[in-house]
Image (cartoon, grey):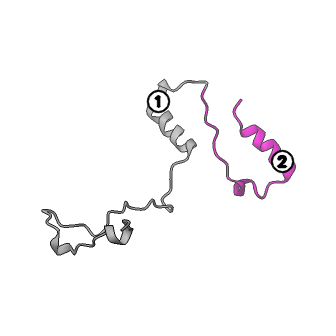
Amino acid sequence: MLPSIPRLVRILPRSQLKTELPIPARLVPEPHRSDAKRATLIELLQQRKEQAGTAWPANLRIEPVVPKQALKKVSPETRKELLELMRER
């Protein structure tokens, strides 16, 4: 007779198992939360800059983030000039 999976598998009731610790219901890791806000790269760099203080290199500048809604009511020609002015050189 050839061995088969149903022939090799034997199901034991939990009462027959001898364990010192109680058997946990599930051993599944906690899922990652997608609604938790992660820090952006700019926020992380700003935190590092604050921590470094005067030790922060002068050639590393962080441009401020300007949301589109802040420039929504500005005319397109002026908007382009404003964006160029806001960039550090």
Q: Is residue 80 left or right of residue 41?
A: right
Tell me the element at label 1. Answer: helix
Q: Which stretch is magenta?
A: 60-89
- Residue closer to the observer: 68 or 70: 68
87 falls in the magenta region: yes
What x and y, as percent, mark residue 77? 87, 48
What amino acid does circle 2 point to? Thr
The structure residue drawn at horizontal position 71% and vertical position 39%, both measured from the top left corner, is 86
What x and y, as percent, mark residue 63? 64, 38
Please identify the residue farthest to the front as the structure is shown: 1
Q: Earlier in the sequence, mark 1 or mark 2?
A: 1
23 falls in the magenta region: no
Q: Is residue 46 left or right of residue 25?
A: right
Residue bearing mark 2: 78
Q: Residues within 10 Å of mark 2 (few under 14, many from 20)?
A: few
The structure residue drawn at horizontal position 55% and vertical position 47%, both measured from the top left corner, is 40
- Residue closer to the observer: 31 or 65: 31
Residue bearing mark 1: 53
Q: CA distance from mark 1 to mark 2?
A: 35 Å
Residue 20 sits above or below residue 16 on the image: above
Q: Quadrant of the C terminus?
A: top right
Residue 74 found in image quarter:
bottom right
Q: Quadrant of the N terminus?
A: bottom left
The structure residue drawn at horizontal position 37% and vertical position 60%, both measured from the top left corner, is 29
Tell me the element at label 2. Answer: helix
How many discs appear? 2
**Discs 1/2, front:** 1
